[in-house]
Amino acid sequence: MTDIHSDKILILDFGAQYTQLIARRIREFGVYCEIWAWDHDPAEIAKYAPKGIILSGGPESTTEKDSPRAPQQAYDAGVPVLGICYGMQTMAMQLGGAVEGGHHREFGYAEVEVTAECALFDGLKDHAGSPPRLDVWMSHGDRVTAIPEGFTVTARTDSVPIIAMADESRRMYGVQFHPEVTHTKSGEAMLRRFAVDICGCETLWTAANIIEDQIARVREQVGEDEILLGLSGGVDSSVVAALLHKAIGERLTCVFVDTGLLRWQEGDQVMAMFAEHMGVKVIRVNAADRYFNALAGVNDPEAKRKIIGGLFIEIFEEESAKLRNVKWLAQGTIYPDVIESAGSKTGKAHVIKSHHNVGGLPEHMKLGLVEPLRELFKDEVRRIGVELGLPREMVYRHPFPGPGLGVRILGEVKREYAELLAQADAIFIDELRKSGWYDKTSQAFAVFLPVKSVGVVGDARAYEWVIALRAVETVDFMTAHWAHLPYELLDDCSRRIINELRGVSRVVYDISGKPPATIEWE
Ligand SMILES: Nc1ncnc2c1ncn2[C@@H]1O[C@H](COP(=O)(O)OP(=O)(O)OP(=O)(O)O)[C@@H](O)[C@H]1O
Ligand SMILES: O=c1[nH]c(=O)c2[nH+]cn([C@@H]3O[C@H](COP(=O)(O)O)[C@@H](O)[C@H]3O)c2[nH]1
Ligand SMILES: NC(=O)CC[C@H](N)C(=O)O
Ligand SMILES: [Mg+2]
């Protein structure tokens, strides 16, 4: 079998907002890559044997004392190196050029002129005529003012004379702009020139190959043992279920916990999909009473999360004790979770969201972990889901937090609130789907506000609950804009929710971005 990790690019991260994008772009055209912090043990680089190294951008200034530098091993590895923005600046600095600060900050669109032949820009032009001109996206304050010996200036703009540099003999390249953002028109092509043409990577990283590779690895890891998977019906655990079912068939048992805090009719849908259609063994644990009892009288959001998470663990434990031979617990951990926890280990100031998953399992469970998605981005997980035959609606559905409606009912959780909220949410989602807006938003849901407001319904006074609607657009869920839904759509949602649901007299729309607001209300 081909080793799909044999041809890979290593990205050294200087803390840029776009480092994950570099990795995603490269993987999109089929080359595996990993992100390491810039101060990751440099002795590991040679062992890892990447076919090329990329130095990312970063918020700091190379002109400042003690600012980060790439390890010398990166330049000595004998493989091509590409510095992007801060990466180019530190490359220039370290190899004998110069960088200056204090210039006018260049942010956003710029047209650059290619001034010399360069393998990175080979054949690329975004405008007719010559010399070739490229549309790029910039975000920098510092600039390279002298290139190291052996380098040539390969691109300029009207205001900045050194926008790209290259030393073709040592295969070292620097670009001041960001090829990883889609605003740089030929950016993907440049990254492909680098990874495929210059570094010589084969494009082996495809959905079909990833599945085959993961199946082989899981089989090797668990041998004849059984695996228990917490199946939520969400994207990640569903893809894990499909993958593991293919890898070990009957030896996979899923536990689906119906917390009473799920989306409308979700429990039945999950069971229908996995147990009936796919023949996966799924144990449904109807735990709504347990959840509502445990949550009674609890108002504090963190306390609620802890109770919900704790009950998940209790239930997984109970179920695994009932099975004979379970030695492994499968999780839907994905690559961003891994990068973020690595970030915190090296003490980087990345924005980190605390991920709810089954990772907090107590030691005494002694279950080994199976995490077949831990190298993948969400969009890769989705492509694999499609390749494994999961229906598109399931694979492209919005994420749903583990604590579910528990964090969308503000304050104390009650069964009656959960039932109302699930229905309001279903109406909102239904309207989004009908109008084609579901796929244009990254996540959308209703929130239950335990406040009463006065209304008038059929000439009578109503004094009832408030439902808030939230819809956001985001790439990584770390920052988000509120979705500019059409007024007509909001109007339809509001009317339907108030008319169809007893107990709601007012609907509001949340117009807060993240930051400062988070996506969920609790
Ligand atoms: N109701 C549930 N029953 C069983 N396991 C659950 C349940 N809710 C969450 N989990 C477990 O917690 C993990 C993390 O939940 P999370 O919501 O992050 O992922 P997901 O549900 O698989 O995907 P998505 O992000 O699309 O919602 C899941 O992969 C699953 O293993
Ligand atoms: O599985 C989960 N367990 C949680 O405890 C949790 N809290 C938030 N989320 C989801 O994470 C994304 C960002 O949410 P916030 O802006 O509210 O932090 C959004 O997609 C949220 O739905 C969670 N997912
Ligand atoms: N985006 C970046 O990498 C910026 C690099 C450096 N902080 C500058 O302002 O020039
Ligand atoms: Mg989920």
Image (tube, rainbow, N blue to C red):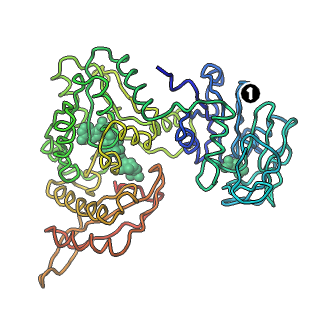
Ligand 3 has an atom within 8 Å of the beta carbon of the residue at disc 1: no
State whether residue 343 appears in this view.
yes
Amino acid, disc 1: Gln
Quadrant in the rendering for residue 316 = top left
Q: Position of residue 305 (x, y in %)?
A: 30, 45
Q: Position of residue 279 (x, y in %)?
A: 19, 32
Q: Mark 1: give few (<14), some (14-19) or many (20+) Cα within 10 Å.
A: few
Q: Nearer the viewer, residue 246 or 356?
A: 246
Quadrant in the rendering for residue 217 = top left
Which residue is at a point 19% across and 30% down the rendered structure image? 281
On screen, residue 490 above or below 52: below
Q: Nearer the viewer, residue 374 or 50?
A: 50
Mark 1, residue position: 72
Q: Is residue 30 left or right of residue 75?
A: left
Q: Is residue 479 left or right of residue 218?
A: right
Q: Is residue 503 left or right of residue 242?
A: left
On screen, residue 86 above or below 325: below
Which residue is at a point 27% across and 73% down the rendered structure image? 492
Element at badge 1? Answer: helix
Q: Position of residue 95 (x, y in %)?
A: 81, 34
Which residue is at a point 21% across and 25% down the rendered structure image? 320
Q: Nearer the viewer, residue 259 or 35?
A: 35
State whether residue 309 appears in this view.
no
Q: Position of residue 235 (x, y in %)?
A: 33, 43
Quadrant the C terminus occupies: bottom left
Which residue is at a point 27% across and 47% down the rendered structure image? 304
Quadrant in the rendering for residue 6 = top right
Considering every residue shown, the one lying at the far bottom of the view is: 459
